[in-house]
Image (tube, coloured by chain):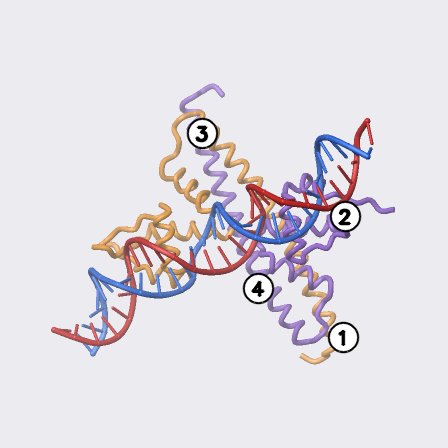
Chain colours: A orange, B purple, C red, D blue
Amino acid sequence: MERYYTITELTREFGVSTRTLRFYEDEGLIHPERRGRTRLFRAADRRLIQEILRGRRIGFTIAEIREIIQVYKDPPGEAGQLRLLMKRVDEKRDDLKQKRKDIEETLNELDHIEEACLTRLAEIGVGT
Amino acid sequence: MERYYTITELTREFGVSTRTLRFYEDEGLIHPERRGRTRLFRAADRRLIQEILRGRRIGFTIAEIREIIQVYKDPPGEAGQLRLLMKRVDEKRDDLKQKRKDIEETLNELDHIEEACLTRLAEIGVGT
DNA sequence: ATTTTCTTTGACGTCAAAGTCAATTTACGC
DNA sequence: GCGTAAATTGACTTTGACGTCAAAGAAAAT
């Protein structure tokens, strides 16, 4: 018998609310099993949630996340659809590369700020 | 006489609406000059807008962006404040590093998807 | 068995970040 | 100077992503 997770176990693990997970189900991102009305999350659901949250962290909308999941679940078979998908993938890639650059730059800025703080601290409170 | 930009020039350059720039002014992120009621944007405002949009792209809230701007404009002088700031900087750094990792992973996924598309395309429509 | 502790459902609320719209006011092109 | 295009302001609306109840049904613990 495969192990399953309760909803609160997962909320604790991932730091999200039950509302969030139910919301994701309403949005068609996950489909946990049911025993009666109670949701049973399997390892596959858990992994999917991890992916969803990763998407969320980098700013994907629910719709985008759903799209990606959809593509994995049932990839388009028709050539036109495939080309369309590749175009969208390309766009997303550019988007993410820009974001990565933005992040690098901001990390540099943060370094500068921290340095400035240290310098300033050394100037005033010479202790600690 | 220094050159200035009109609001629509900037909206076109950055792909945002006038409402957005006025919103940023309302939120105290920028302070363009005025001739009568009309806003005049200087090069400094323009650069600031670039930074704001960069912050936006990586998911900073208006409040966070305002905070960063504030720190540049008038860095805290008191030791406690400085340490607090450094803590916040550290947190942000962790956050951004996680995001960078998320992006790397997602870029990999996108590569896989694209490959799969190409393979599939080769299988069906053997010509272009 | 019954208390306590989840869990679910559904409806409504909220919050950030703008979008939209209407009614004026400029500014510009000639 | 005058018409037209652009800018401003203020109010209201929207959108996405949940939060917050309340009421009621199930589970677990004693």
Q: Which residue is mark 1?
A: A123
Q: CA distance from mark 3 to mark 1?
A: 61 Å
Between residue A41 and residue B49, name the one nearer to us.
Answer: B49
The residue beneath circle 3 is A82
The amino acid type of the residue labelled 1 equals: Glu
Label 2 crowd bin: few (<14), some (14–19), many (20+), radius 10 Å: some
Q: Is residue A37 left or right of residue A75?
A: left
Counting from the top left corner in percent of width and height, residue B46 is at 73, 48
C-alpha gap between disc 4 and disc 2: 36 Å
Identify residue type, mark 2. Answer: Leu
Q: Is residue D28 above or below residue B58?
A: below
Horizontal side, residue B18 vs residue D21: left or right: right
Q: Which residue is mark 2?
A: B40
- Give the residue at mark 4: B91
Give the quadrant of the C terminus of chain A.
bottom right
Element on which disc 3 rests: helix
Say whether residue A124 is left or right of residue A83.
right
Question: Marks 3/4: CA distance?
Answer: 41 Å
Determine whether the residue tagged by mark 2 lies in a helix, strand or loop. Answer: strand
- In this rendering, which labeled residue sits more in front, label 4 or label 2? 2
